[in-house]
Structures are given as structure tokens and as C-alpha cells.
Image (cartoon, helix red, strand yellow):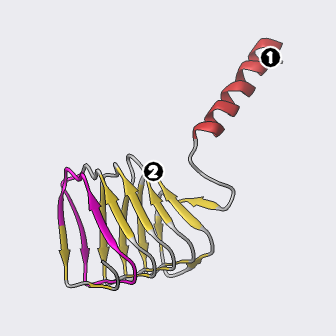
Amino acid sequence: MSAPGIKSAKYLLSLSLLAATPVLADDINCQTVIGAVTVDDNLVIAAPCTLNGTTVEGNIRIFTGGSLTANGAVIDGNIEADTADFVAILDSEVDGKIELESMVGDLSYVRDSLIDGKLKLKDNRSRLEIQGNYIGDD
């Protein structure tokens, strides 16, 4: 049996960890490889995440320490990355926009993909390659 002070400290630590996590109720934290399935919610990424033929019926948000590799993926929403390691999008479809801001890895790329919205690049420190895409907006 633990002392009352230890229980309270564990409870407060649990609450502070929950408050620091950028995951909302309908968000799924991706830190693995996802195959040819449909994800019905938003994805949040703070670790390496790979989508192989995956459909995401929401937005993807990539945070510091996170990276996204998408091959043949369909994203019904937006992809937003801020201070992420890298983004590698190949032969994929994004029905919204892609925003890459303050990327810190060696190389990020978007190749041979369909982007219905805008592709916005801002204050990136990493090398970016944008090749062979159809971009529906600016």
C-alpha cells in the first residue's frame, strides 16, 4: 500500500501528462506503420509514422519529433507539419492543403501526388523537393 502523498503525486503527474499531450478526443496517435485500411479520425504524429495505401478521413498534424511517410495514401483533409523531422509523400492524394513549416530534417518531399488545396512552405531549414504533382490551388 502506498502512502497518501505518493498517490496524490501520481494523480497530479497523470493529469499533467494528459494536459501536455496534443491529442484531442477524436484524434489517433500514429507511431507505427499503417497498411491499406481506413482511419476514420484525425491523425496526430510525434514519432515516425508510415501510411501504405491508407485512407485517412480527417486531418494529419505532425509535431516536433514526428515524421510522415505516405505511399499511395488518400488523405481526406489537410496535412500540417510544424518543426517536424520530415515528410515524404509519394503517389498520394490530399483533398485539402499541405503546410510544411520550420521542417528540421535533411530532406522532405512531395512527389507524383494530387493536392486539391494549397501547398505552403514556410521557414524550413531542411531541403524540400516538390516534383510531378498536381496542385489545385496556389
> Element under label 1?
loop
Look at mark 1 in the image and give the residue it sits on: 2
Judge whether residue 3 can be spotted in this image. Answer: no
* Along the line of sight, the residue nearer the viewer: 58 or 13: 58
Question: Which quadrant would the C terminus be assigned to in this image?
Answer: bottom left
* Along the line of sight, the residue nearer the viewer: 24 or 118: 118
Residue 123 part of the magenta segment: yes
Tag 2 near tag 1, CB within 8 Å: no
Q: Whole-percent x and y of residue 133? A: 25, 84
Judge whether residue 93 can be spotted in this image. Answer: yes
> Residue shown at 50%/74% (left/top)?
77
Q: Amino acid at mark 2?
A: Ala
Question: Which quadrant would the N terminus be assigned to in this image?
Answer: top right
Q: Whole-percent x and y of residue 120? A: 31, 66
* Along the line of sight, the residue nearer the viewer: 30 or 58: 58
Residue 47 part of the magenta segment: no
Q: Amino acid at mark 1?
A: Ser
Q: Whole-percent x and y of residue 100? A: 32, 60
> Element under label 2?
loop
Q: Which residues are magenta?
A: 105-128
Look at mark 2 in the image and give the residue it sits on: 46
Label 2 Cα crowd, 10 Å radius (few <14 / some 14-19 / many 20+): some
Task: Describe residue 22's horizontal placement relative to residue 68 as left or right.
Answer: right
> Residue shown at 65%/39% (left/top)?
18
> Residue shown at 34%/81% (left/top)?
137
Nearer the observer: mark 2 or 1; the answer is: 2
> Residue shown at 25%/49% (left/top)?
104
Q: Earlier in the sequence, mark 2 or mark 1?
A: 1
Determine which quarter of the picture holds residue 58.
Answer: bottom right
